[in-house]
Amino acid sequence: MPQPIRFDNSYARLPEGFFAAARPTPVSEPWLFAFNRPLAEDLGLDAEALLADGAALFSGNSLPDGAEPLAMAYAGHQFGQFVPLLGDGRAILIGEVVGRNGERRDIQLKGAGATPYSRRGDGRAALGPVMREYIVSEAMHALGVPTTRALAAVVTGEPVYRETVQPGAVLTRVAASHVRVGTFQVFAARGDVEGLRALTAHVIARHYPELAGRDDAALALLSVVAGRQAALVARWMQVGFIHGVMNTDNMAVSGETIDFGPCAFLDAYDPAKVFSSIDRGGRYAYRNQAAIAQWNLARLAEALLPVISEDQEAAVAAAKEVIAGYGARFQAAWLDGMARKIGLETVEDGDLELVQDFLAALHAGAADFTLAFRALSDLADGSVSQEAVLALFTDPAPAAQWLLRWRARCTRDRLDDTQRAGAMRSVNPAVIARNHRIAEAIAAATEDGNFGPFHALNEALAAPYDDDPRFNAFRAPPTPEEVVTRTFCGT
């Protein structure tokens, strides 16, 4: 049988203290219900060989030659409270591959059993959270948001005991790496400066090789990670995404979205919206996400201080300058993307106010975030009428006044109506992973063993910017009875 995965495991070669060896715990009756063939091919994997033994491989019952399973060590601020050691409590990194494009990727099993960091937990995952992460991570990829990916998903044939008894499952997650802000924090908490140096060198070699050899490499790393985070959070906010649990152990230094526990997409626009059942104070509300990313970056800066400079005052001053500059970087990325969403080719004075006023009109009119921007795209070339757009608002007056200003502003750009509408449709999705659709797919699978809605939803989300009449039903917002008010972490 051909070897399905060719590993090249750099993290396993790092010093003691970076991880603990951890083998998956076998399950009784694994069944493969999802396999991402296009991703497998991008990774240079033998898809047919993987499928031949898919249930065993993706459950962790058998491991390919060259796998070096391990659980990574990290710390983290969880809702602002520091925990000096967390680590992979239910995830096992089985190895790394170099894909067809030359990029190195981690392959990780999530829900594969207890590890040395499980803290008396079972290390398992329930089917619902596995399905949610598969759906949302692939939807984010299709939307153009840098993200971890889902390669496969397996039901284990064994129950998982949480508030209720649920079917167990394992997700195979793919990431540029799983190094987080919290990975740096665990070495800082130990006072292990050599560990920090080794981790900094590893991250630079893996993600930012252009920084290698610089005298200020650690400071440059902080700066480039800050830029990546500014662009990432701006991008996901532009499609109405709420991460839900932006702890420092959930911020990847690669600039990818990681961990899709209590995440959700906005329906009606509300900047204060919170879905996560564990975010009782609204720390990670939609409008707070940019500031929280900056707060997390400040924690990364603190961890990096001894590597930035042996002169603590100089290190603090340099790090503060990077963190202070984050706000302008985020604002530039956010405004650039939002200007494109309303069809502007360039950004000029007054455009920030124009964007903010449209969002205020959405909020006042309880308008659906995704549908309103898509309808505005269609209005740009006359595909829909102004009346159809205003019908999305419970209070259309502010939106009607705004449209007059928007039309006047558009005349100062070089785009014609067709060009403008096409550009807008390329950034304003028609279909998103709506919360009620995810809930329906999970209920069908967990209650009836029916994975049809799961596969149909994934198909609809694969090309979110297309006008495909086959997926019109997936565009609709929830009815009052379908509204999802709370999402859950799954741990």
Image: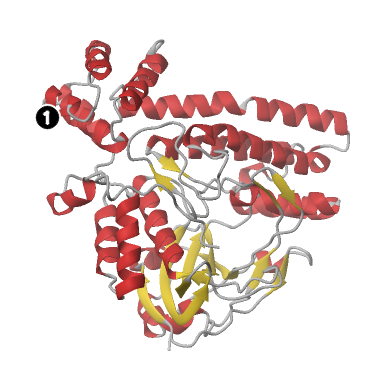
Q: Where does residue 79 sit, x and y in percent of width and height?
A: 64, 45
Residue 457 vs residue 459, the one in the foreground:
457
Residue 401 vs residue 282, the one in the foreground:
282
Query: In which quadrant is the N terminus drawn?
Result: bottom left
The quadrant in which residue 157 appears is bottom left
Three-letter amino acid code of the residue under disc 1: Val
Q: Where does residue 327 sit, x and y in percent of width and height?
A: 58, 26
Q: Where does residue 31 sit, x and y in percent of width and height?
A: 39, 81
Residue 174 vs residue 439, the one in the foreground:
439
Q: How is the image coloured?
A: secondary structure
Q: Residues within 10 Å of mark 1 (few under 14, many from 20)?
A: some
Q: Where does residue 264 sit, x and y in percent of width and height?
A: 41, 47
Q: Is residue 426 above or below residue 434?
A: above
Q: Is residue 3 visible?
A: no
The quadrant in which residue 375 appears is top left
Q: Is residue 365 above or below residue 5?
A: above
Residue 356 vs residue 92, the one in the foreground:
356
Q: Residue at x 57, y 38 (%)?
A: 283
> What number of labels is visible?
1
* Residue of label 1: 384
Q: Is residue 380 visible?
A: yes
Q: Residue at x 39, y 11 (%)?
A: 350
Q: Residue at x 78, y 65 (%)?
A: 15
- Mark 1, secondary structure of its residue: loop
Q: Is residue 16 above or below residue 202?
A: below
Query: In which quadrant is the C terminus drawn?
Result: bottom right
The extreme right residue here reads 311
